[in-house]
Each structure stands twice: as C-alpha cells, then as structure tokens.
Amino acid sequence: MKQVVQNYKSGELAVLDVPVPGCKPGGVLVRTVYSLISTGTEMMKVSEAGMSMLGKARSRPDQVAKVMQSVATNGVPATYRKVMGKLDSYTPLGYSLCGVVEQVGAGIDDVKVGDLVACAGNEHALHAELNWVPRNLYVPVPDGLAPQHAAFGTVGSIAMQGVRQGEPQLGEVALVIGLGLIGQLVVQLLAASGVRVVGADPDPARCELAERLGAAACGDPASTAVENAVAELTDGHGVDQVYLAAGGGSNQPVELAAKLARDRGRVVDIGKCRLDLPWNAYYEKELDVRFSRSYGPGRYDPSYELEGRDYPIGYVRWTERRNLACFLDLAARGKVDVEPLISHVADFDDAVETYRRLKDGELKAVTALFRYPEQAGATEEAEAPAVAVPAVRVKAGPARAARTSVKLAFVGAGNYATSMLLPHLAQREGVELSTVVTTTSLSGANAQRKFGFAKATTDLDAVLGDESIDAVFVVTRHSSHADLTRQALLAGKTVFVEKPLALTEEELAGVLAAVEESGNDRLQVGFNRRFAPLLQEARDHFGARSGPAHLRYLVNAGRLAHGSWYLQQGSEGSRFVGEGGHFIDTASWLLDADPVSVYATATSGNEDLQVVLRYPDGSTATISYVTTGPSGFPKETLDLVADGRALRLDDFVRASVYGRKKWVSSRLPKARDKGQNAELAAFVKAVRTGGPMPTPLQSLVATTAATLAVQAGLAGGVPVTLARSK
C-alpha cells in the first residue's frame, strides 16, 4: 500500500510503498476514502522539517531540553547517534480520515466489513491507503453524512473539546482569535450553543467566511473593529470566553484576550501560540486560563486508545470517541457545515505536490483533502444509492357526491380478507357487499354464502365496468397488487389495497402514472396499525414533542409454515417487502414525518433484519424484524422516547406513557385490536361522504419507497437515500 511520509532531518516528503498493517484484536482495518490535511498542525510540522538544525532547535525548545538531559545521562556520542537516528527516519503524516472497514479484529462487534467509519489519531488515521484503528479511535458515520465531510471528525473533536473547556452558556459572548480550520469550527459550535461570537483574524476572507458560518462580527485584531464589536455586544463588559485558535510566535493573541475578556472571564488555549501572559492584566481581571488537550479525555492514555478501555460515562461524559461521534451527529443534522471549509481536494497520488503548494503559499486553503485512488469516481455512486419517492401529481377532479350507502367489491377472498376485513364490513350499516371476484369458482361461492355478497364471479372486468360499484378492495397475492390497483384507479374506483402497494419502483411508478392519467387519487393501503385505538390513545397521552425522537420496534414475526406462498420471493417479493410497510408506516405516523434514508442489515439468508430509518429532524426508528424468536414471546413491542417522555406499546394489549405523570391503559381482552375495524370505518366514511382518504397518498408512497429501500440497502450494504421528486 502507499503512505505519505516525511524525513524530519532533510524535510523530504514522499509517497512510499509500505506493508499493509495487520488487523490486530481490538480494532479494525480501514481502507481510506478521504483524509484531511491539517493546514495548521501538519503544515507547521512540514515547515519545521525544512529548517536548518539550528532552526529546528529554536522551534522546539522542549526537545532541546530532552537532548541536554540525555547528554548529561548518556554522553555526547550516544546522544548524537540517538538524535540523528531519530531525525533521519521517515515519520507519518495525517490524523483525521474517513474510510470503509475492510477487516474486523477479534473483540469488535459494533461495526462490520463495509461500514463507513471516521477515524482519529496521529498513529492510526494517517495519510495511507490502509490503517489499523483501535476501538476508541473510530466511530460509525451517521446515515446521510458524506465521507468527505466525515473526514473532519478529528479536527471537529479538537474544536469541540476546546468549546467544552470554555463551558459556554446561552446568551454569552465569545471571542475566537484565529479563524483557520479549528477557529471556523469553534465559531459554528459556539453559534449552535446559543453564544454570540466575535472573530479575529488578519485574513479578510477568513473573517467573511466566519460571518457566513454564524459569527456576529469579525475583523483584523490590529484594527478597532473587533474591540468595537465586543463593546457593542457586551455593553462594554467584555467577552465571557476567549478561544485562542491561532498559531505562530506572536504574543498578540494572549494580550488581546486579556484586553477584551470580562472580569473573571475564561481564556481557553486550543492552538499552539505564544503564551507569555501579561501578569498584571491577567491578575487584575482574575482570568481563568484553561488548556484544551486535543480530542478530549482519553488522549495520550494508552489504556484508552490502544487497549480500548473506556471511561465510565458517569465519570467522564465526553471522551475522545464520544466527542467524535457527537461532532459527526451535528454535521449529519446540518448543525455544523464543513462544506464551505473545503478549499481543495487532491488525488492521493499528488500528495507531495499538494504539500509543496501549501508550504509555498501557492495554494491558499482552510482545509485540503486527499481523495484515494480506488475510491475516486466510484465513491459518490457507492456511498449513497437512492430509491425514488415520486411526487403525487393529480388534477383536482369534481367533488364526489355524498351517498347514504356504498357498494363494495372484493378482488380476492383469501384468509386475510375473510378473517380480518369482511367480518367488519358485513356488519357495518350502510355497506352493501356487491361482488366478489376470485380465481376459483368455489372460493367465490364460499365468500358469497358467508358474507352476503350479491354476486360472485371470476370476471374482473365485470367489476371494473360496473358504474354502480363505489370502491374495490384488492386482497390478492402481492405480485398482483400494483397492476390491479392501477386498473381500478383508471376505471374511476376508490381503491383499498392490502399491503404492499408495489414490489418494485417500476410498479410504484405505474400506480402513480394511473393516478395522474385518470385524475383519481382515491387510494388507501391497508396500513392499519396507525388506526389501533390503544396506540392512538397512547399517542394522545404522549403529546406533541419539540426535539428528535428515538423509536424502537421489535417484530417477533416467527417462522412461516413450509409451503407458504410468502416464501415465493422470486414472484411475491421478500417477506419484509410484503409486510414491513406496516411497521414503517406506524413509525412514520408516530414521528409525524416521512423517512429520508434507510439502512438495513440482515443475518444469513435475510431472515432476520435490522432496519434503521432516519427522519428530517434527526429522529430515528429502528425496526428489528426477527423470525427466530420464541412463539410465546409478544409479536410486537414498541418504545418511543423524546423530550424526557417515553411511550411503550406491548403487543396491542397494554400501553403506557412515562413523563411527569404516568399513564397505563387497562389490559385489553386477549383479542388484539390492531386497527382494522377503525381503518375500514374511516375508509367507508371517505367513500360515502367524498371526503379525504384516511391516509394521505404521499405518505403511502413514502412508506412504500422506504420498504423497497430496505431490499436495496441489503443488496448494497450501505445507507439508501430516499430521493424525493420535485
């Protein structure tokens, strides 16, 4: 494999062929997609390597002190050989990247091969095609976050740790000195925390960028602009916090911090700048000077970084890894925008030339990224496959007249129709069961005898051509749903189709084409759980929410009997495509939104699935669909948590809501009401009155697309974006 290295003695930069690192226990082998060039830390190291020996000594007095100690202990000759040997060696560059897990070491169970991860560490997240990364220095990349943005994870964690050290509070004012990469991220994190920010940097372009990203005002520290902005925002008291994100040998940042901080303000050093504190200024204001150590607690601790020993969250809330995950979450939810910080993307093979241009000032960049050869051109396609969510387009037709009763026809009279739908309809006042269409004469005759249909036939056209029939129920095998629905819509019928609406994107598009052609959007899919009285009552007690929610849905589906037509995946689609829409629709109804992305993983044979849905406000829903659970365990259990409240549904038998007050439903009879009767009542009412359908058509389309995206995600092993048509 190839890796960027530097000889600190000569300053030489090279891309070397080196052995592939082994995948040791406690970590993963990651193939890099993008790595980030730190134009601050890395370029300082590159510049130092180009200095004379005297210049190196002046720039690193701490290392000179170590050399002198070694001379006193070991003598000049031995120390000279040791120092020259260390200087005349290749050292790695890089510490922040995003890549794909290529191999998983023993003891790792939170990621798998093919997962996208962000990695940190100047020994483990190097500018190299492959890196071995220990457990606490990588995190999975959230759905929807581009790999080039996830490559900012480490520098984002550095900025975040600095902000945490400043302990910002709502309404405070902060000064950020130095608007390079770290400074720009600090500005955004502070703005997201409700803090007003003033920036200071001699570069006008960086000042303008910081203002675009949330700063209230920015200016050259040598001018009066910064001082005036601070005075205006603080009523002359001075800023609550100062963040030193500048580098170099000037003492101006430290002096400016003392001048513009309020009494007992906080000064946080994040960058590597000169720190000759003016004693009187710092003493008189009793300024609280703090240091921010890299990515957060755990940094430089071998037991944490190399051995994977985490710190208990009750004692250390924000570790390196938790900071990394938090920053990626903010970026995925759009709270931090790193795209404007990317000044240049270079091919990895051009690494040496890129460093030269950065060093010589030919390339001006806040951030530069390396794009790796095997990913170039293919990453964009592989990282974000999409399933279309077509927009519903229909011309408003004439209002439908209300009627005293409705005539219904059934296409199909199998077990579900005769056990879960027809018993409710046969007893409903104002409903006339007109015609039942089946493929065999005897099944039609049985349905006619049991439920009182006026006619039984095997001729579908007899139903579609009968103008007296108001609505058609499509309750056949899955492979025929889309086509029968399309025909019924074109015939002007209101349609109730059992799930699924479609088995493919093409079938879904065909149904919507029929809606557009006919102007008939009177369609309902049998997603009945949102109509379950117990779940509706629990939702009412839970109330509205303001923040993102987390929903967990366990479906203990059980094994199918041998010979079930549900197992005919070639013609009838997968089992989850057949009934998974139930659970996606329920989650979307509870979260009051349609999903924007889907990630799915499965056991061998795709029998047991884990489906993660992501929603526009950052909410997530996890559906565990298992076929290997015990038969005595409840079939469906659901938990919804948000805003300090929790809702629990136990298999449509009991529900509870926990918050300021606890609500627990009375236990229902053994027969679970999953909402079929209420859904049918709402459907019949819509047909009778001409009012809106019980579930908006766009919601039905979004749920169907999300269900289809599960299959696409299983095939590709990556998150699938749900792309909405405009």
Image: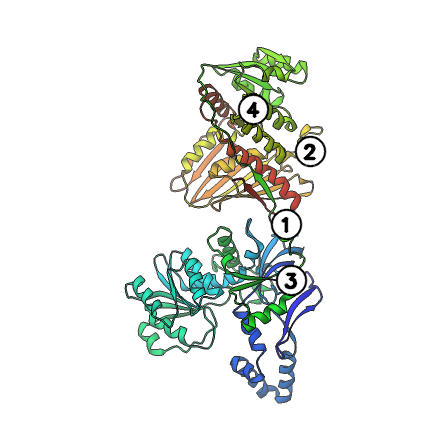
Q: Mark 2 and mark 3 in contact (Cβ < 8 Å)?
A: no
In-image side of 84 versus 62 (left or right): right
Quadrant of the snapshot with the N terminus: bottom right
* Type of the residue with mark 1: Ala
Asked whether the viewer can see residue 120, the reply is no
For numbered disc 4, what is the local secondary structure?
helix
The dot on residue 570 is none
* Type of the residue with mark 4: Leu
Query: Which numbered disc flags the more N-terminal residue, 2 or 4?
Result: 4
The mark lying in front, picked from 1 and 3, is 1
Residue depicted at 35% across the width and 74% down the height: 282
In-image side of 693 versus 563 (left or right): left
Residue 712 coordinates in the image, percent (x, y)? 63, 41
Q: CA distance from mark 1 to mark 2?
A: 26 Å
Residue 681 coordinates in the image, percent (x, y)? 48, 22
Asked whether the viewer can see residue 686, the reply is yes
Q: Which residue is mark 3?
A: 131
Residue 530 coordinates in the image, percent (x, y)? 49, 31
Q: Quadrant of residue 553?
A: top right
Query: Which numbered disc flags the more N-terminal residue, 3 or 2?
Result: 3
The dot on residue 489 is 4
* Type of the residue with mark 2: Gln
Q: CA distance from mark 4 to mark 1?
A: 37 Å
Q: Which residue is mark 2?
A: 569
The mark lying in front, picked from 1 and 2, is 1
Q: CA distance from mark 1 to mark 3?
A: 21 Å
The mark lying in front, picked from 2 and 4, is 4
* Type of the residue with mark 3: Asn
Residue depicted at 63% across the width and 24% down the height: 476
Q: Which residue is mark 1?
A: 382
For numbered disc 1, what is the local secondary structure?
helix
Query: Which numbered disc flags the more N-terminal residue, 1 or 2?
Result: 1
